């Protein structure tokens, strides 16, 4: 078990009751260390999204235990009162589509999260610009999302996921809309950011071209995870 | 914290501005309708103010002379003038009719006033051009809203009148401009019949054995003469002497002259509470309908704008935005839309008001009340969209 990153034990999620109950997650165990990027793959309906929603504190697991860093956030019940603040401060999200706020420019899209947490606007923008520079999109800082290419939008979305320095980032098919070159570039960026900010990143994907880049992969099928670690896996 | 509503409005300003203009025209119509009502009340009050009277003496048990017809003898004013507390008393007639001027008709209230006594009740209190009526016949003073000029020749019934003076804000409760003519002419105009009717009346009277008695010479001529003279007026306007209350003077007139007397407050109640009450209700109904339509438009637009942002709202909720921040954003947009609409509406109403045929009085307090009503409507209209936004599940931002 790691002291940082994310660690989950025997996590279960059941939908419905009685005869109609469906066990979407069955005693899932997973550990992602700080600075590590792991893949979570599986066919449709295998429980990937359910696991991601449980990790993201969007839905309630039925049982199990989750830790973010040293903090137990779930132990057969939420241990955190304000799940919204938990999502805002401790968990970063990167989606299949960038889902940038169309009426905010690039800087404010990234700076919005720290602003919501009460950080003064100028400091939040400075923090956003630092990340945009790290992701090499600082030259589009004042552009509107509609003026960006797909790859640029996804980099801005990654910057938004990282801006509050969360211990964990959940990336839901972040390369799906991108071509091979851009998809690999995004994975490279996620690896760089994970190392630089010591963030644990879980990437849910179907994308065959990026699967070989993960050093560790969790396969999920019928709500059960299997870990795969391979020599020669991984790409920087 | 940045203003999400402000940024969204700036981003899609065209949608907001054009919707605001549409809403603004609706609000402009609403403000104008309120102005029409205020104008009717102001016209009614101007009618009473400009008459210069403290008491209106009318036919018994009528609401005359403005709300109902009233007919009293034209010699009663002398007795009333001699009563204690009466500073001035004057006969007056009112007749709303089409006044012919060249090739056009002007709807006007023809007021008959006793010639030669400027300053008496019923007379125009001031002129903007020309002079008061000095002759007993065929002179007129007209309100400038009638469009008449000094020297114009008017035709009332069969007689022609020359405009010798122009006055301002002398209108009926309906907003029709007044035309003042000498009392005798006005009395004649009220009951003037055409030649055929007069001839027919004479024949019928002559055929009546009660009036045409060979043994009473001169009877038929006397009866015929009485039929061609109108010795009635609509009201006597009374101005009080200093130190007398209206009731002190009205009570003896009611008792000894057997007439109905109204003071200023009673006459205002008749004009505003009875004469224009139906029109006021009509306008009130329009205002309610316009308010409902405005609310529906704001609700629809805000709902549509929110529907367009469902995915962004899910993302905002997922990344930790509070419900109240999202609700505030939607409500601020609704209020911004209402503000744009109100400004456009106020400007539209201000510029359109002078072009209305009736007097439109835009009161600042109506505008303030209208602004708050628009804001309230916007808040209520945004509740549907806020409910929709708060029901958005943040999980919608995550696929699967």
Image (cartoon, helix red, strand yellow):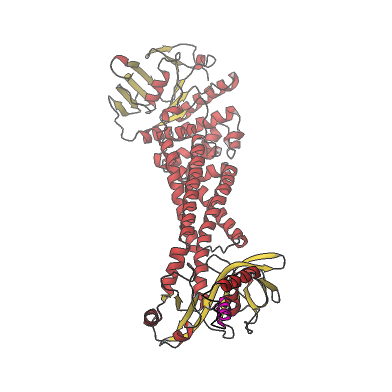
Number of numbered discs on residues: 0
A70, B96: nearer the viewer: B96
Looking at the image, which residue is at 55% across and 15% down?
A: A209
In which quarter of the view is residue B127 placed?
A: bottom right
* Quadrant of the snapshot with the C terminus of chain B: top left
Within the magenta stretch, is there residue B222? yes
Q: Position of residue B164 (x, y in %)?
A: 67, 79
Query: Looking at the picture, how far across and down is residue A122, in whole percent?
Result: 49, 45
Q: Which residues are magenta?
A: B218-230
Q: Between B237 and B297, which is closer to the camera in this rendering?
A: B237
Q: Is residue A162 above or below residue B370?
A: above
Q: Relative to residue A7, is residue B62 drawn left or right?
A: right
Left/right placement of residue B226 relative to residue A222 reads right
In percent of width and height, residue A201 lies at: 44, 24
Which of the 4 quarters of the picture holds residue B277?
bottom left
Is residue B267 visible in the rendered structure shown here?
yes
Q: Main secondary structure of the magenta part?
A: helix
Is A41 situated above or below B70? Answer: above
x, y percent for residue B175: 56, 66
- Residue visible at 28% across and 27% down? A77
Q: Nearer the viewer, residue B139 or A94?
A: B139
Residue B2 visible in the snapshot: no
């Amino acid at each position: 078990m790691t002291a940082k990153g994310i660690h989950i034990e025997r996590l279960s999620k059941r939908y419905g009751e009685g005869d109609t109950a469906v066990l979407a997650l069955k005693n899932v165990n997973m550990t992602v260390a700080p600075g590590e990027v792991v893949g979570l793959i599986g066919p449709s309906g295998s429980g990937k999204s359910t696991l991601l929603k449980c990790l993201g504190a969007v839905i309630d697991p039925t049982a199990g235990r989750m830790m973010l860093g040293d903090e137990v956030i779930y132990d057969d019940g939420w241990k955190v009162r304000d799940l919204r603040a938990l999502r805002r401060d401790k968990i970063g999200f990167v989606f299949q589509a960038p889902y940038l706020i169309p009426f905010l420019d690039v800087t404010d899209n990234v700076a919005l999260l720290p602003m919501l947490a009460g950080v003064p606007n100028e400091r939040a923008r400075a923090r956003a610009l630092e990340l945009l520079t790290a992701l090499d999109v600082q030259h589009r800082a004042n552009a509107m999302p509609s003026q960006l290419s797909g790859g640029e939008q996804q980099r801005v979305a990654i910057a938004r996921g990282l801006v509050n320095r969360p211990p964990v980032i959940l990336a839901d098919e972040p390369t799906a809309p991108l071509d091979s070159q851009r998809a690999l570039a995004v994975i490279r960026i996620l690896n760089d950011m994970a190392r630089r900010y010591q963030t644990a990143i879980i990437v849910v994907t179907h994308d065959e071209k990026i699967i070989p880049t993960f050093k560790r992969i969790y396969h999920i099928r019928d709500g059960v995870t299997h870990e795969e670690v391979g020599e020669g896996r991984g790409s920087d | 914290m940045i203003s999400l509503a402000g940024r969204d409005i700036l981003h899609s300003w065209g949608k907001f501005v054009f919707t605001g203009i549409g809403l603004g025209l609706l609000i402009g119509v609403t403000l104008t309708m309120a102005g029409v009502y205020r104008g009717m009340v102001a016209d009614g009050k101007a009618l009473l103010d400009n008459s210069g009277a403290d008491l209106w003496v009318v036919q018994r048990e009528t609401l005359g002379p403005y709300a109902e017809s009233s007919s009293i003898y034209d010699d009663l004013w002398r007795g009333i003038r001699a009563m204690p507390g009466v500073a001035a008393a004057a006969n007056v007639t009112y007749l709303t009719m089409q006044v012919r001027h060249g090739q056009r008709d002007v709807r006007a209230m023809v007021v008959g006033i006793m010639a030669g006594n400027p300053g008496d009740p019923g007379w125009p209190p001031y002129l903007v051009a020309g002079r008061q009526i000095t002759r007993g016949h065929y002179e007129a003073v007209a309100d400038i809203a009638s469009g008449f000029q000094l020297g114009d020749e008017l035709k009332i019934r069969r007689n022609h009148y020359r405009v010798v003076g122009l006055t301002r804000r002398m209108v009926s409760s309906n907003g029709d401009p007044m035309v003042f003519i000498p009392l005798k002419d006005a009395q004649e105009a009220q009951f003037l019949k055409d030649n055929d009717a007069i001839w027919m009346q004479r024949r019928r009277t002559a055929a009546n054995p009660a009036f045409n008695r060979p043994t009473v010479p001169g009877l038929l001529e006397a009866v015929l003469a009485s039929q061609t003279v109108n010795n009635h007026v609509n009201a006597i306007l009374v101005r009080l002497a200093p130190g007398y209350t209206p009731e002190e003077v009205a009570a003896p007139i009611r008792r000894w002259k057997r007439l109905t007397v109204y003071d200023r407050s009673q006459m205002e109640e008749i004009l505003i509470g009875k004469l224009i009450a139906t029109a006021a209700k009509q306008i009130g109904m329009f205002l309610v309908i316009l308010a409902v339509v405005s609310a529906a438009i704001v609700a629809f637009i805000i709902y549509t704008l929110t529907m367009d942002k469902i995915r962004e709202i899910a993302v905002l909720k997922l990344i930790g935005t509070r419900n109240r921040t999202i609700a505030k954003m939607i409500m601020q947009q609704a209020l911004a839309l209402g503000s744009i609409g109100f400004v456009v509406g106020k400007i539209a109403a201000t510029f359109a008001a002078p072009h209305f045929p009736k007097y439109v009085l835009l009161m600042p307090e109506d505008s303030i009340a209208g602004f708050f009503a628009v804001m309230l409507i916007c808040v209520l209209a945004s509740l549907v969209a806020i409910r929709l936004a708060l029901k958005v599940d943040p999980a919608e931002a995550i696929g699967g």
